[in-house]
Image (tube, rainbow, N blue to C red):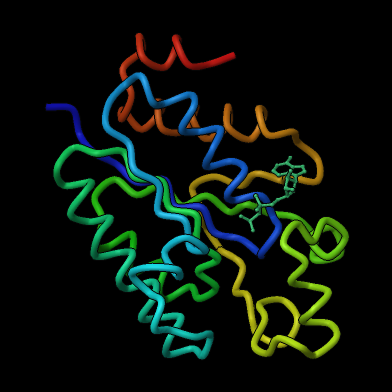
Amino acid sequence: MEQGFCIWLTGLSGSGKTTIAQELVKRLENSRFIEVMDGDEIRKGLSRDLGFSKEDRNEHNRRVIFCSKLLARSGVIVIVALISPYRETRAYAKEQIQNTIEVFVKAPLEVCIERDPKGLYKKALAGEIKNFTGIDDPYEEPLNPDVVVETDKQDVNESVNTILFKIHANGLLSDEAYESMTK
Ligand code: ADP
């Protein structure tokens, strides 16, 4: 069986994690089983009892890490799209989930505010939402991520190509599979 692995996308809200995850699925889906763990979706189900305090964020991330670990162990490609603002939690993810590639989805806060795809920054800036990452809650930038994609400078395809290159370089995709999914 080919090895499972995890692409862990971390970054501010609106930086492009979900958009990149969806494109990664399109490229990878013919190769084997693939599962996306999107923070916003998981908060509607598995983590619906949790809020945005540091404790709750850590618990939310811990649940995602637990599920991702089981999936990757069973050979699945797991794509995690989670703000995951704390370095310590991301280090724990790498320790727990086999073959985890940490991707910093980087965009300046002003760009994320400008994009505001979910209208959340508007609410946070108006004080209608509290503990919003980047506004009144911290985001600890990765110090040594495996991949950095700058979504204000690269388009989605370039970001996805950079990520796939790294996965292949780490021996997690065969030459044949890699060639068929790069464009
Ligand atoms: P997140 O999941 O990080 O909160 P989303 O993917 O939901 O972010 O939103 C990112 C927004 O930015 C989308 O509206 C997307 O179309 C836009 N966008 C513009 N340029 C890029 C890019 N290069 N990569 C990813 N998203 C981009």
Q: In the image shown, does 152 or 57 lie closer to the viewer?
A: 57
* Lateral position of residue 127 relative to residue 90, left or right: right
Q: Residue at x 70, y 58 (%)?
A: 14
Q: Residue at x 69, y 55 (%)?
A: 15
Instruction: Point out the image quarter for the C terminus.
Output: top right
Could you say where residue 91 lies in the image, as x and y percent from the top left? 38, 67
Q: In the image shown, does 140 or 18 lie closer to the viewer?
A: 18
Where is 88 relative to 117, above or below?
below
Q: Would you identify the image quadrant in which residue 160 lies?
A: top right
Q: Would you identify the image quadrant in which residue 176 lies?
A: top left
Could you say where residue 137 lies in the image, as x and y percent from the top left? 65, 85
Could you say where residue 37 lies in the image, as x and y percent from the top left? 40, 54
Mark count:
0
* Lateral position of residue 89 relative to residue 145, left or right: left
Where is 65 relative to 133, above or below?
above
Q: Residue at x 64, y 87 (%)?
A: 131
Could you say where residue 53 lies in the image, as x and y percent from the top left? 51, 90
Q: Residue at x 55, y 73 (%)?
A: 85
Q: Would you identify the image quadrant in which residue 171 lies?
A: top left
* Lateral position of residue 114 relative to residue 21, left or right: right
Where is 47 relative to 70, above or below?
below
Q: In the image shown, does 81 or 143 lie closer to the viewer?
A: 81
Instruction: Point out the image quarter for the N terminus.
Output: top left
